[in-house]
């Protein structure tokens, strides 16, 4: 953990890119989850009728 922290400290640009990538991935994951949630709701509503 400390070793990787020292490497990251040396490569600040890489850290920023990595954090941006993580943030982007998190937003995509949330969007996918919301899509699946709404898709399931629609599917369930169709099955009810």
Image: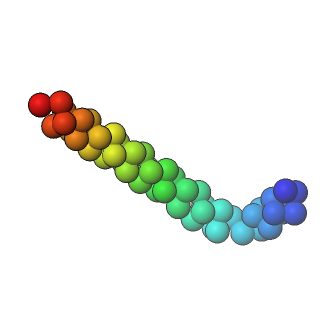
Tell me what residue is drawn at x 41 percent, y 54 percent.
Answer: 28
Q: Position of residue 31 (x, y in %)?
A: 36, 48
Residue furthest right as drawn: 2
Between 23 and 33, the one lying in front of the other is 33
Q: Is residue 3 above or below residue 32?
A: below
Image mark count: 0
Q: Is residue 33 above or below residue 22?
A: above
Residue 20 visible in the current orientation:
no
Between 27 and 9, the one lying in front of the other is 27
Tell me what residue is drawn at x 49 percent, y 50 percent.
Answer: 26
Which of the image's four quarters has the N terminus? bottom right
Q: Is residue 32 left or right of residue 14?
A: left
Between 37 and 26, the one lying in front of the other is 37
Residue furthest left as drawn: 49
Which of the image's four quarters has the C terminus? top left
Q: Is residue 44 left or right of residue 37?
A: left
Q: Position of residue 2 (x, y in %)?
A: 87, 57
Q: Position of residue 19 (x, y in %)?
A: 59, 57
> Which quadrant of the structure image shows residue 7?
bottom right
Q: Is residue 45 above or below residue 34?
A: above
Q: Is residue 16 left or right of residue 12?
A: left
Residue 49 visible in the current orientation:
yes
Colour mapping used in the image: rainbow
């Amino acid at each position: 953990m400390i070793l990787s922290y020292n490497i990251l400290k040396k490569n600040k640009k890489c850290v920023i890119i990595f954090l941006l990538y993580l943030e982007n991935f998190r937003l995509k994951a949330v969007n996918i989850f919301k899509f699946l949630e709404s898709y399931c709701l629609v599917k369930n509503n169709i099955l009810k009728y």
